[in-house]
Image (spheres, rainbow, N blue to C red):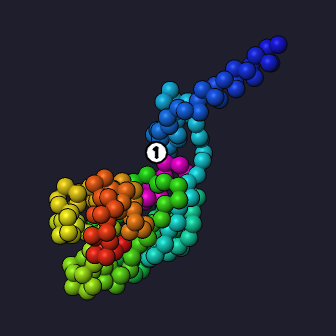
Amino acid sequence: MVGIGLIVVGLGMNVWGADRKEKVELIKGGEYRRVDEVGSVVQGNSKVMIDMGGEVVRPGVYGLKTGARVNDALVAAGGLGVNADREWVERNLNKAEILRDGMKIYIPNKDQSRIQNLKILGTEDGLISINAARVEELDKLPGIGPSLAGRIVDYREKNGGFRDINELKLVPGIGEKMYEKIKDKVAL
């Protein structure tokens, strides 16, 4: 009877917990764990899978503990490669950001960054990079003011950059009409 009661209680807790919110919590030694809103551990030693590419010593897919940071991913990939654009990394990569499952981190080499900077300045093909442009540069797009340009930057930072130009439609204030106006004037 006691065994059946425990099973029923366990199932009830399982169903009750299905809609609880989770968060990442710091534990001793700089490690993290996922916990629900009442503090129960949801996932202990789970991993996130990330893809490290570009100018790192060992590009590839890595499984890191939930709660790991971008800096941990760089260490796992052997650090920056010889030709990595270290200036770009310092300006654009938040090494303290918590990794998300399925995240792609790409480190450009010095030549790629130079070409990208030319695109941003409009001296190569006139396209503005939605993954690198500042608010002032995005503001130059037709129909995009400083407020909407700020939302583009906020979306980019919150989501680890744009993976596709169509993602612009997910930025609050950019509908289909606005997207049609700017889609040929932007690049990743």
The foreground one among 188 and 100 is: 188
Amino acid at the residue labelled 1: Gly
* Membership of 66 in magenta stretch: yes
Q: Residue at x 79, y 14 (%)?
A: 2
Is 71 drawn above or below residue 141 in the view shown?
above
Is 21 drawn above or below residue 46 in the view shown?
above
Q: Position of residue 158 (x, y in %)?
A: 36, 54
Residue 18 occupies quadrant: top right
Residue furthest toward the right? 1
Position of 100 with respect to 173 (left or right) is right
Q: Position of residue 75 (x, y in %)?
A: 48, 63
Region rendered in magenta: 65-72
The foreground one among 89 and 10 is: 10
Q: Position of residue 39 (x, y in %)?
A: 51, 29
Q: Which residue is mark 1?
A: 30
| Element assignment for label 1 | helix
* Membership of 173 in magenta stretch: no
Residue 1 occupies quadrant: top right
Q: Residue at x 20, y 64 (%)?
A: 143
